[in-house]
Amino acid sequence: MSAPKFAPTPVLDEVRTYSSPEVAPAAWVNDRPTDIEGFQPVGERLGFQGPDQGYGLMLANRFRDRMNLIGGPSADDAIRGCLNIALRRASLFGRAPVIHDLTIAFTMWGFLDANPPHELVERRAELFEGVGNVHHYKEGRAIADLVPEATLRMTPAAVVAASPVAWRTLTGA
């Protein structure tokens, strides 16, 4: 690095040039112990990784006033179960959750329908019961795992069009 013009230097001093350090550090090796070797692990209760999943919870709470909970689970149970589906869909596309992920999840389970089929109400009541409690993580994951990948790849309009009639196909239940 050059010296500023205002720094006084004696005229008789030699000009300083680059010189190597006396000791060279050891070569760098990529040996981080937490690196995943190979593919991402798969198995029970590992979930679906994705960015900014906490934002999905904020979006899910926006549906609280619009949900139809006739004969079904509590609002917290419905939100937690549908959030798991939305997070799975978002991670399938490699992005953070958006409102459409949640619209699909709430629609396929009839939470946005004024008159959902009686069989759907019974099925979601038994599946979503208690899922809002953090101790029921496994049951919440089971709800997300039920939904076929083909349903997750559908557009929100396609799910709305098919939801009242084909709920078994959409939900996988």
Image (cartoon, helix red, strand yellow):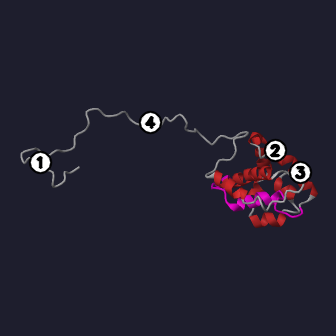
Residue underneath mark 4: 29
Q: CA distance from mark 2 to mark 4?
A: 48 Å
Query: Residue, x 84% and y 46% (percent of image)?
Result: 129
Q: Earlier in the sequence, mark 1 or mark 4?
A: 1
Disc 2, disc 4: CB below 8 Å?
Answer: no
> What is the quadrant of residue 107 in the picture?
bottom right
Q: CA distance from mark 1 to mark 4?
A: 43 Å
Q: Earlier in the sequence, mark 2 or mark 1?
A: 1
Tell which residue pokes out farthest to the right in this image.
118
Tell which residue pokes out farthest to the left in this image.
12
Query: Crowding near pointer 1: few (<14 within 10 Å), some, many (20+)?
Result: few
Q: CA distance from mark 4 to mark 3?
A: 54 Å
Residue underneath mark 1: 9
Q: Earlier in the sequence, mark 2 or mark 4?
A: 4
From the viewer's side, name the closer residue of 112 and 93.
112
Q: Earlier in the sequence, mark 4 or mark 3?
A: 4
Q: CA distance from mark 2 to mark 1?
A: 78 Å
From the viewer's side, name the closer residue of 166 and 56.
56
Marker disc for residue 123: 3
